[in-house]
Amino acid sequence: MASQLRVMMLTWEFPPRIIGGISPHVYYLSKNLAKEGVKVYVVTCDFPGAPDHEVMDGVEVFRIDSYKNPSPDFASWVFLMNMNMQKEAAAIVKSLGGVDIFHAHDWLVANAGIGLKHVFRRPLLATIHSTEIGRRNGLHSDYERMIHETEAWLTYEAWRVICCSNYMVSHVKWAFNLPEDKLVMIPNGVDAREYEKSTVDLNKFRRRFALPEEKIVLYVGRLVYEKGIQVLINAVPKILEKVNAKFVIVGNGYMKEPLWEKVKQMGLAHKVLFTGFVDDENLRNLQKCADVSVVPSLFEPFGIVALEAMAAKSPVVVSDTGGLSEIVEHDLTGVKVYPGNPESLAWGVTRVLLDEAYANKLRENAYRMVVEKYNWEKISRQTKNVYERVLSEYSRTFWA
Amino acid sequence: MRVVIFSWEYPPRIVGKLANHVRELVWQLAKNGIETFLVTYHEYLTGEFEDGEVKVYRVTNPVKTHVSVLTWVSTLNQEVERVAANIYYKSGKQIDLIDVQDWHFIPAAVTLKKAFDIPFVYSVESLEDHRSHGANSPFNMAIKSIEWLGTYEANTVIVKSNWMANEVIRAYKVPEAKVKIVNPETKHWLESILKVYRELKGGCCGYG
């Protein structure tokens, strides 16, 4: 290669700022692209205690002032953050003497990505991790339509649109009326090695969450409608009829309070534990302790949490929807159940918990698949190939 | 000298007093030998037009549904940047300055300054503090924060009266030397503007 490929990643979250799945995705992708010889600059929002500029695992990270402007609502905050991000990124690109490609993750950085594309006349790539129309199961207000149209605008301006599952490719194609050849499927990944690092005594660690005789049923995710946490709560009594278990619910969201109230009314407060946010190391240990990991989503573009559970060698029970349908092969690498159906979910969970040999078979198969198919080395090579293809197409345009 | 003016209103789109003032300004600039480009918004009359000697570019909003003027402006700025960048690349990467009329396209002017070292003038027509009668909801404060960014990043702030000069200095703590008063009702207003432009030409990042 003549010179090093330089890519500027735009993302609203990057470690230590972790809100959802984009942060770890961009972190592992950037780190592994750097190993592949790509020069990666990440421009992201600031976080208390994190430096404005640092090199992290070979990736150069710039954190911009993102809470400068008062904002009436979340979308307005996003747009004003983009104003600042674009301004800072423009100065960074100038000081670097240019970059080859801009890579934006979701509508949260649409404005900045699109502006930089035109100002520096460089190709823009977009990864669409999720859509408003999917998250909300339709568009019900001007606010939601505005976000949907901003997503459409990003896919319109992008040279290629990357999605993490075949399901998302067809969903995005439908949602924004995109031509087939604009879309690329590159799966999300998980770093299985991260799960081997911990030296904690898991038996002791486990006791912080459950009694020795209780099986641990683990849920990890935001506590919001589309993640289907309410389906799991409804399945709790049905599961307890058959197995003694403790339900550990990791994450936050607007449904936390109402669900906790409901659990108390059901008289099951001693069986369900809401932990709130849990840091990476504790989360990995929890996933290793889990006798079953449940992903009961109603809408799931990819389902990274299922892969993480597999990497932790925890058997998974997932709803048969979206990206989860592609990740899990029923009876081989996990159990699939009907989305939004507590009876079906309870059936899947008890099946795994009551048959140890079956559970162990799922663990082994799933772990092997994760390491082979969803490793970041492979994913970053695929991403680099897309960059190179785009740059070769770009070199024949009048912008080049 | 090559100057690009940003204004969110320009005939035939007339919202308030600004449209005709800007039209007068760009016509006079062109008449005085300034290569003048005007970038503005129109819902559907988009593209490149010749208005006398002035080259007019109209852009529309790529996002049609919005919840406020604040979000509306936010997605429109990238189109302004796109057109301004096209002018920049087509003219041998030389724009001497940008004059942004009122707050709407300040984000674009700031980005272009950071990317290409193009100095810019922020011409204040009115302030959010007066338009909203001192309201300080997050919405008003957000617009004020954009106006502040304009006064902070601009090389020169042009106002139309002594009163407005004092208001800009009061509201955004702008250094006095950065504020120039040009009353468009007076006889030599255009010469005063040209003087500001000439001082800025070729020298970004000083206070002129």
Image (cartoon, coloured by chain):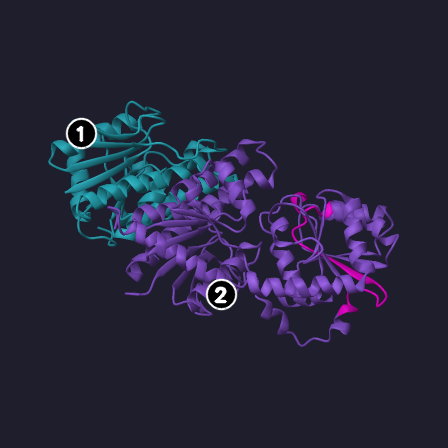
> What separation in Å lies between label 2 and label 1 (alpha carbons)?
59 Å
Which color has been applied to chain A in this rendered view? purple
Q: Amino acid at mark 1?
A: Trp
From the image, state whether disc 2 or disc 1 is nearer to you. 2
- SS state under label 1: helix
Quadrant location of the N terminus of chain B in the rendered image: top left
On the same chain, marks 2 and 1? The answer is no
Numbered range of the magenta stretch: A206-230
* Left or right, residue B164 beside residue A244: left
Parent chain of label 1: B
Q: Position of residue A341 (x, y in %)?
A: 75, 43
Residue at the image position 63 percent from the left and 49 percent from the top: A325
Could you classify mark 2 by the number of other residues whose Cα lies within 10 Å: few (under 14), some (14-19), or many (20 or more)? some
Parent chain of label 2: A
* Residue A220 found in image quarter: bottom right
Q: Position of residue B24 (x, y in %)?
A: 21, 28
* Left or right, residue B114 beside residue A238: left
Residue at the image position 31 percent from the left and 50 percent from the top: A393
* Residue A24 found in image quarter: bottom right
**Foreground: A10 or A276?**
A10
Q: Position of residue B56 (x, y in %)?
A: 23, 31
Question: Is mark 2 in CB contact (under 8 Å) with mark 1?
Answer: no
* Left or right, residue A250 beside residue A154: right
Which color has been applied to chain B in this rendered view? cyan
Q: Amino acid at mark 2?
A: Glu
Residue at the image position 49 percent from the left and 41 percent from the top: A76
Instruction: Write down the residue under mark 2.
Output: A377
**Foreground: A106 or A195?**
A195
Q: Is residue A73 magenta?
A: no
Could you classify mark 1 by the number of other residues whose Cα lies within 10 Å: few (under 14), some (14-19), or many (20 or more)? some
Image height of B79 relative to B203, above or below: above
Instruction: Write down the residue under mark 1.
Output: B27
